[in-house]
């Protein structure tokens, strides 16, 4: 059995417009790399971090907290070193903390011979994710571990449903270089929601799930509507309305906030449309003076990938 593994832990989009805290999907060409090594000394040791200034203490690092939760349950007769090569900017809204949390438990599970399934790994990773967002939720974690689209049916007990991915679905992401903390973005949300809005949101989630199962792009377009969260969180993102209008005007099926922001995602049918949407997003932000990144990605149906072991 191997003693070292190198993995790619992907970025993810959570909420997916109408699916606050329950829906997410996995991106393909943006993510972190991690090296996890089995050692004789028991415990979790973060030995290298590149890219961003994050804590080395395992109990303060999301990857470390997730790993600690797993080994507390598994009680292996060994320990693990973790190297993190961070490419997803913390606070970007595309699952930076979840990539770390999911990656550490995935890698350790592989080195232990896969004693846990993806749902169990999601449970351990939630312990680390809670360090970043001040609450346990799995809408970013589940897509990284399962791949594709996922629906968090329940947190207690934890139940994750895999949702089919239409083959021609592409995501376009724009990431303004500002930071929005998940805990702060959650704090501005209303505590009570009008019943008519709740009913509308339930209908959108249900129809989106049906549309993904049937590859009904027209229904996807009509379902990607967030009438509860987006009106509040969009105020934290400069020029959000302009970006959304431009994306929809250039053929996007829908456009909304990725996670808690500031990244904005759009879903499109076909790569050409997705690239046109990217150009439209760039045009809006190129006139703002705010630095930004954009990329186009197919939906990653595999999740975390092993680079070598």
Image: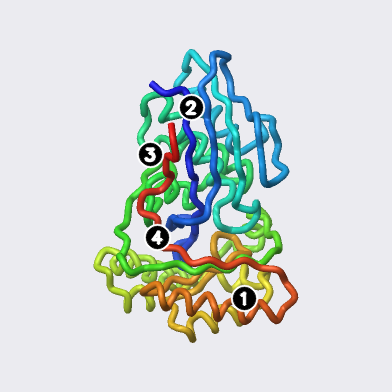
Q: On the image, numbered disc 4 is attached to which residue? A: 299
Helix, strand or loop status at disc 4:
loop
Residue ID at (60%, 77%): 282
What residue is disc 2 on? 4
Mark 2 and mark 3 residues within 8 Å of each other at the beta carbon: no
Element class at badge 1: helix
How dense is the environment of label 1, judged by Cα within 10 Å: few (below 14), some, or many (20 and up)? many
Tell me the SS state at disc 3: helix
Residue under label 3:
118
Residue 164: x and y in percent read: 29, 58
Q: Which residue is mark 1?
A: 240
Residue at mark 4 to residue at mark 1: CA–CA distance:
23 Å
**Residue at point 48% right, 27% down?**
4
**Is residue 80 placed above or below 27 in the rendered structure?**
above
Report x, y in % for residue 42: 56, 16
- The crowding category of the residue bearing disc 3, from other C-alpha atoms within 10 Å (few below 14, some 14 to 19, many at least 20), is some
Image coords of residue 138 (percent x, y): 48, 47
**Relative to residue 188, is residue 235 depicted above or below?**
below
Could you tell whether 305 is left or right of 181 in the image? left
Mark 1 vs mark 3: which is more N-terminal?
A: 3
Nearer to us in this view, 35 or 71: 35
Calculate the distance from the C-alpha at mark 1 to the C-alpha at mark 3. 35 Å
């Amino acid at each position: 059995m191997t003693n070292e593994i190198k993995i790619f832990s992907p970025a993810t989009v959570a909420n997916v417009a109408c699916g606050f805290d329950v829906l997410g999907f996995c991106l393909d060409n943006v993510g972190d790399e991690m090296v996890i090594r089995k050692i004789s000394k028991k415990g979790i040791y973060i030995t290298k971090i590149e890219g961003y200034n994050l804590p080395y203490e395992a109990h303060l690092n999301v990857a470390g907290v997730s790993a600690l939760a797993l080994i507390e349950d598994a009680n292996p007769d060994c320990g693990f070193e973790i190297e993190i090569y961070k490419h997803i900017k913390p606070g970007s809204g595309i699952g930076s903390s979840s990539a770390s949390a999911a990656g550490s438990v995935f890698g350790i599970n592989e080195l232990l011979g896969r004693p846990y399934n993806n749902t169990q790994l999601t449970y351990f990773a939630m312990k680390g994710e809670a360090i970043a967002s001040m609450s346990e939720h799995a809408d970013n974690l589940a897509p990284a571990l399962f791949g594709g689209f996922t629906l968090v049916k329940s947190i207690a007990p934890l139940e994750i449903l895999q949702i089919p991915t239409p083959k021609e679905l592409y995501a376009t992401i724009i990431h303004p270089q500002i930071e929005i903390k998940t805990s702060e973005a959650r704090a501005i949300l209303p505590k009570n929601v009008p019943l008519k809005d709740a009913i509308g949101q339930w209908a959108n989630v249900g129809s989106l799930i049906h549309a993904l199962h049937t590859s009904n792009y027209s229904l996807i377009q009509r379902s990607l509507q967030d009438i509860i969260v987006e009106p509040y969180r969009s105020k934290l993102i400069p020029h959000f309305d302009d970006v959304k209008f431009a994306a929809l005007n250039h053929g996007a099926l829908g456009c909304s906030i990725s996670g808690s922001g500031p990244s904005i995602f759009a879903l499109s049918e076909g790569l050409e449309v997705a690239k046109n949407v990217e150009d439209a997003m760039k045009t809006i932000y190129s006139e703002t003076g705010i630095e930004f990144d954009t990329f186009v990605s197919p939906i990653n149906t595999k999740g975390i990938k092993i680079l070598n072991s």
